[in-house]
Amino acid sequence: MKTENHSTSHVARHVQKIPRSGIRDFFEIVQSMSDVISLGIGEPDFVTPWHIREAAIYALERGKTGYTSNLGTPALRREISAFVGKRYGVEYDWKSEVLVSVGVSEALDIALRAIINPGDEILYHEPCYVSYNPSVVLAHGRPVAVPTRAEDGFVLKAEDIRRVLTPKSRALMLNFPTNPTGAILPRSEQEKIAELCIEHDLVVLTDEIYSDLSYEGELPSIASVPGMRERTVFLNGFSKAYAMTGFRIGYACAPAELTEAMMRVHQYSMLCASIISQEAAVEALRNGDAAMQSMREEYRRRRNFLVHHFKNMGLPCHEPKGAFYLFPDIRSTGLGSREFAIRLLEEKKVAVVPGDAFGPCGEGFVRCSYATAMDQLETAVERIADFVKGRK
């Protein structure tokens, strides 16, 4: 007997609607070419410091190859609690308010899935990291973008959030310093946004993966604003500041009720983070400050170099206050973001990421990562300057 088929695809409708990553599509083109200087990778060009790698090796030598608690090892959770308390002034109980995740991406995903009811609206600022919008959709929420502007230094404004609030608004996602603009969120603006979140009972998910790569001194977290700890999920990790991308290790700190909810999602998906990575992360928090500061100073040197040269090319450029990205305005060339990036790649073999990959308001800009060796940056700016000169 023939069964009537009501579906044209076996893929869930909400997954069908998710676009492919604009970064990945572009870099499939890059990978098909040779001798390209890439300013597109959001990954430190440093190797993980030796003492951290050695801790991972030693963990293997001691036979540490099994599962850990869903929440993570007690040793790492204690270190995270102590670090966050000292660095951000926010105290979390390591037993019930700290969860170790497989990178910050997983922490963000389980946080969203723990708080979203179908149809809830989740606010986030654009331009932003490419996964934020799709992560909300995958959790059956409705993403609502709040644009930021170059003339404001890409700082998120409370009044712009207020304009998009509705009774369905459930949470606000923050990422400062921001990928791709390097913008930070000043304390004065944190306080205005906090007031709004309290007034409208919003949960805040704050992704602070780049906070230790700040050129403005130690940045405060919105979690430390009075009245915010109880409604904030603080997210951080080891990939950027300690050059540990391949270890895939991150964490979330939140009130016990939210941590328990995230743990339930985590235990039925990832179960736990790698014990080897957790051992390495303990070493990073105990003894990794000097290496982290050294890498940050090198990023600062590269940032200053790039900002200077882009301005000399006549491309307006907001000076990033953190992370390792530059987001120059390329509109004066008469090219759109994607056309600029493709032509630069084809004609000069320099890869940058089109700004519209980070949301519609990124159009007219490109992202340039300076997590690339200085000699490569020197060659890249010569090629970009030559490319831009021919279009002015």
Image (cartoon, rainbow, N blue to C red):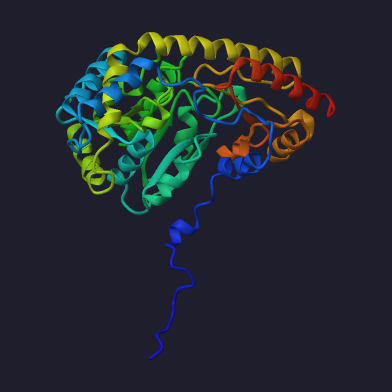
Image height check: is 311 above or below 333? above
Rendered location of residue 13, percent (x, y): 45, 62
Rendered location of residue 26, percent (x, y): 62, 42
**Name of the residue lying farthest toward the front:** 61
Q: How many marks?
A: 0
Question: Could you tell me which residue is drawn at 36 percent across and 11 percent down?
Answer: 289
Quadrant of image for the C terminus: top right
Quadrant of image for the N terminus: bottom left
In-image side of 330 versus 287 (left or right): right
Image height check: is 38 above or below 165? above
Q: Nearer the viewer, residue 149 or 92?
A: 92
Rendered location of residue 28, percent (x, y): 61, 44
Q: Quadrant of residue 310?
A: top right
In-image side of 155 versus 338 (left or right): left
**Name of the residue lying farthest toward the bottom:** 1
Q: Nearer the viewer, residue 49 or 269?
A: 49
Rendered location of residue 288, percent (x, y): 34, 13
Residue 252 in view, yes or no: no
Q: Nearer the viewer, residue 353 or 248?
A: 248
In-image side of 38 versus 390 (left or right): left
Residue 12 in view, yes or no: yes
Question: Could you tell me which residue is drawn at 23 percent across and 35 percent down?
Answer: 65
Question: Could you tell me which residue is drawn at 73 percent across and 40 percent down?
Answer: 339
In-image side of 231 versus 167 (left or right): left
